[in-house]
Image (cartoon, helix red, strand yellow):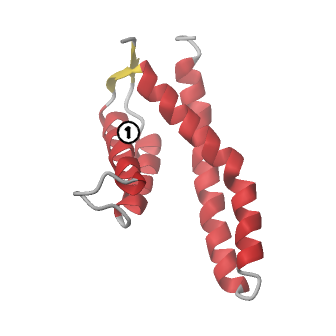
Amino acid sequence: MQQVNIAPNPQIAVIFKGWAEDWAKDSQANQKDMATKFHTVYTIAAEMFSKGGDIELTFLSALFQDCKTKLEMAEAMNQKIKASLKEDDARAEQLIAKVNRAAQDAAHVVRYLGQLLKPAA
């Protein structure tokens, strides 16, 4: 497995830590559901970017693809929120703001990971 050595990046670590905490609310340690898997992956990513060091290229690539998907799906999610909560504008705006924050964070991670992955390509 090809490894990439990364410097610690507290900004990226905070993003992944926040996502891990969001997924922790829905995960259960004894379940192997998507919430638990995302919580685990984001927790590992947060730790890795906190410490730096050698990281498997496949893991970085998977994180890149995940964040890219988050970014691409943000507008569709916002449209679904607007449609399903058209009677509750305040709730819709709250959820849209959360989706937009996640998309902004994902864009930052995509730019950063893209730079890390370029030399390995």
Q: Nearer the viewer, residue 113 or 30?
A: 30
Q: Is residue 108 visible?
A: no
Residue density around tag 1, few if under 14, some if 14–19, many if 20 or more, within 10 Å:
many
Is residue 5 shown to the viewer in this render? Answer: yes
Mark count: 1
In this view, 49 is above or below 55: below
* Residue 64 position (above or below residue 33): above
Residue reaching furthest to the bottom: 87
Counting from the top left corner in percent of width and height, residue 59 is at 42, 28
In the picture provided, is 24 more to the left or to the right than 118?
A: left
| Residue 118 sits in quarter | top right
Q: Quick one: quadrant of the N terminus?
A: top left
Q: Dot 1 corresponds to which residue? A: 45
Left or right: residue 48 compared with residue 95: left
Specify the amino acid type for callout 1. Answer: Ala
Quarter occupied by residue 90? bottom right
Q: At which x and y percent is residue 70? A: 61, 47
Residue drawn at 68 percent across, 77 percent down: 92
Which residue is rendered at x = 74% and y = 57% of the image?
Answer: 76
Report the front residue among 37 and 118: 37
Dot 1: element: helix
> Residue pushed farthest left?
30
Look at 49% across and 31% down and name the residue there: 62
The x, y position of residue 114, in whole percent, is 59, 26
- Check the image and report above or below for 33 versus 58: below
Residue 115 on image: x %, y %: 58, 23
Looking at the figure, which quarter contains the C terminus? top right
Left or right of 84: which side holds 47? Answer: left
- Residue depicted at x 37% and y 54%: 33
